[in-house]
Amino acid sequence: PVPAAAAAGEEIPAEGGPPDHSYSLSSGTTSEELLRKLNEQRDIIALLEVKMKEMKGSIRRLRLAEAQLREEIREKDRLLHAASAGTRKRHGL
């Protein structure tokens, strides 16, 4: 019989071979290694959380800038419309 992983097209590491991923653990992993990997993962999660907060702040600033630009465009459109309506009235159009 073919193992399910092989049938699914996944690579199966040879016995005693290196794990497929840097986060994989061999059966002989010590508690010190587990603790080190756990701390690495916590550090990565903390960095990702910081980046997410930075990105949320950037998105917030971009949305505010967009709203201000849209308001400026509306104001300029209003002024142009008023100016062109005034010009038509003066010329009897």
Image (cartoon, rainbow, N blue to C red):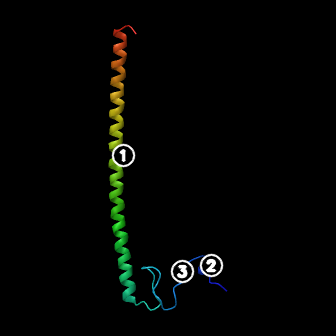
Crowding at dot 1, Cα within 10 Å, few <14 / some 14-19 / many 20+, comes out as few
Q: Residue at x 37, y 84 (%)?
A: 35
Asked whether the beta carbons under mark 2 and mark 1 sit within 8 Å of each other, the answer is: no
Q: Residue furthest top?
A: 92
Percent position (x, y) of residue 8? 60, 76
Kind of element beneath mark 1: helix
User: Amino acid type of disc 3?
Assistant: Glu
Nearest to N terminus: mark 3 or mark 1: 3
User: Amino acid type of disc 1?
Assistant: Arg
The mark tally for this picture is 3
Asked whether the beta carbons under mark 2 and mark 3 sit within 8 Å of each other, the answer is: no
- The residue wearing badge 3 is 11
Q: Residue at x 64, y 84 (%)?
A: 2
Distance between mark 3 and mark 1 Cα atoms:
45 Å
Percent position (x, y) of residue 13? 51, 85
- The residue wearing badge 1 is 63
The quadrant of the rendering that contains the C terminus is top left
- Which numbered disc covers residue 44? none
- The residue wearing badge 2 is 7
Crowding at dot 2, Cα within 10 Å, few <14 / some 14-19 / many 20+, comes out as few
Distance between mark 2 and mark 1 Cα atoms:
48 Å
